[in-house]
Image (cartoon, coloured by chain):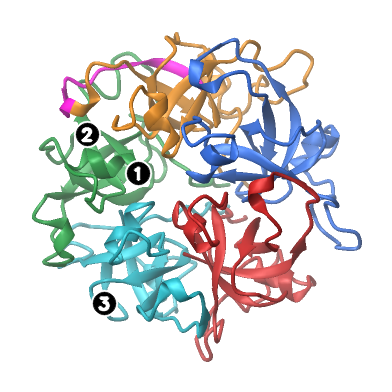
Chain colours: A blue, B orange, C green, D red, E cyan
Amino acid sequence: MKICQVERPLVATNRIALMEHKHLQVVIDGSAKLVAVDAVGAKPGDWVICVGSSAAREAAGSKGYPSDLTIVGIIDHWPPEGAGDDTTAPTEDSAGDTAAGDAASGPGDQTGGAG
Amino acid sequence: MKICQVERPLVATNRIALMEHKHLQVVIDGSAKLVAVDAVGAKPGDWVICVGSSAAREAAGSKGYPSDLTIVGIIDHWPPEGAGDDTTAPTEDSAGDTAAGDAASGPGDQTGGAG
Amino acid sequence: MKICQVERPLVATNRIALMEHKHLQVVIDGSAKLVAVDAVGAKPGDWVICVGSSAAREAAGSKGYPSDLTIVGIIDHWPPEGAGDDTTAPTEDSAGDTAAGDAASGPGDQTGGAG
Amino acid sequence: MKICQVERPLVATNRIALMEHKHLQVVIDGSAKLVAVDAVGAKPGDWVICVGSSAAREAAGSKGYPSDLTIVGIIDHWPPEGAGDDTTAPTEDSAGDTAAGDAASGPGDQTGGAG
Amino acid sequence: MKICQVERPLVATNRIALMEHKHLQVVIDGSAKLVAVDAVGAKPGDWVICVGSSAAREAAGSKGYPSDLTIVGIIDHWPPEGAGDDTTAPTEDSAGDTAAGDAASGPGDQTGGAG
């Protein structure tokens, strides 16, 4: 599962019927923005556990639900206290961004370095 | 799910029978171009939600449909107003490109930096 | 689905029985070389649509076929005419390569830049 | 399967019922932090084998379990003795980090280089 | 499927019962090290075809086997003769490494460039 931070809800009025009216959230996974079905009622800023692959379907409520990323839990404390984790340190790329922007340089970052 | 922008329809006359005559779209996911089955009738320039993994099959209409990426919704507003999102800022790579080109530096970008 | 270019057939005499005698092709996906089961009879140089995930199995002919990447269609025109697409522009990395080499810097490229 | 190093347990009080009370671990995969369901009782610092995709569900105990990453084994010796493996060499990025931090530059690293 | 090179066998005494006693191999996929279930009896140095996704389970011997990467074939000739393939060229990163180390800069490399 991925550790993501919720950015904001996503509205897509025109969507297939199988998606029903479940809430969608834009989540930040490293430097990428993804869309996840929200199964726990997360709020913007929350650090959440997102499950992907075929497990995302059942986690979203039924085996036939068309999800490949579902929020299945809200992490109690992230980043952990005293971890000296670089997820909280502003970097060259994120300095001056919003809190959500800073989060973008957290876990799962696959972006190349610079000289 | 991924946030992609539709670039153009894709024509592949020689294809397996299982694909039927469903419409295929070239979509831009960060800096990569992918092909998605269109289940909502999207137009070039639309920002869409694409579902992958095994969920893409049922979303395309039937459990046996050979899709690993299906457009399941059109996003109402993207990028969000007042987001200060870097998806709208022209960069070194995209300046002078078309709108679709600019979009290529949006969410999901996994390309390395430069010295 | 991915947009790949066929490079050459791949021979693996020692393989599991489940793979039968279906043709395998080396395909180029951005800067990576992958192996795909060929369900359409593609030739080296062809631009093709490759389906992955669990959909690759049924696309290869049967639900039990051990494929995670199957060529399901040949694209009529790629890159599109007048697209101003950077997939045709020789780059620092590919200049002097063969046509297939140039293609390697096309869609799906996740390689970092250079200073 | 991926070779990951266990960093610490993860607590998520608010989670979907399907996840039951199984233990979750933060694991380091190259430079990314992921969450895995622990099926073997691993400790922080252990190098483990993590299985993903749909196989992660059954490995977590039942076909309906919503996991896309499950720890299925603890590696006896990693990195292997006398391997001259760069997974043990401190790099520009990890020097000064904890043991777990050093591990982050190990296998599965997809981060770009620097000038 | 991926083109990988076998590096060495992997021993994990403490593993879930579902994995039985099948052989595991460390394989190199570009710059990443992965673990694959060996269904063909490969040796260190062999270039092999690895299947992932849900197809890896059945390829490993049974539908319930917890594998997401299975070696399904040994490639007859790789890299191909006269290919002018850069998979054989030593690079800044791999010069001085073992044969297996050189292989790490072969197909599937997603590592960023340098200035």
> Label 3, label 2: how many angstroms apart (C-alpha)?
30 Å
Which mark is on residue C65? none
Given residues D67 and C108, the one toward you in this image is D67
Q: Residue at x 39, y 29 (%)?
A: B58
Residue D98 picture quarter? bottom right
Position in image of residue B99 (x %, y %) = 54, 13
Q: Amino acid at mark 1?
A: Ser
Q: Amino acid at mark 2?
A: Val
* Residue tagged 3: E42
Alpha carbon distance from label 1 to label 3: 25 Å
Q: Which residue is mark 1?
A: C54
Q: Are marks 2 and 1 on the same chain?
A: yes
Q: Is residue E99 above or below residue B42?
A: below
Within the magenta stretch, is there residue E75? Answer: no
The answer to whether residue B97 is visible is no
- Please state the horizontal and vertical placement of residue A10, each as a whole percent of the image: 67, 21
Discs 2, 1 touching: Cβ within 8 Å: no
* Image point (40%, 46%), residue name: C93
Q: CA distance from mark 2 to mark 1?
A: 14 Å
Which residues are drawn in magenta? B5-17
* Residue at 48 percent of width and 46 percent of height: C111
Q: Report in which chain the residue with disc 2 lies.
A: C
Q: Which residue is mark 2?
A: C72
Location of residue D75 with respect to E39 vertically, above or below: below
Q: Nearer the viewer, mark 1 or mark 3?
A: 1
Looking at the image, residue E18 lies above or below residue C79: below
Whole-percent x, y for residue E23 in the image: 35, 79
Rendered position, B57 above or below A115: above
Horizontal placement of A12 versus C86: left or right? right
Q: Chain of mark 1?
A: C
Main SS class of the magenta portion in the image:
strand
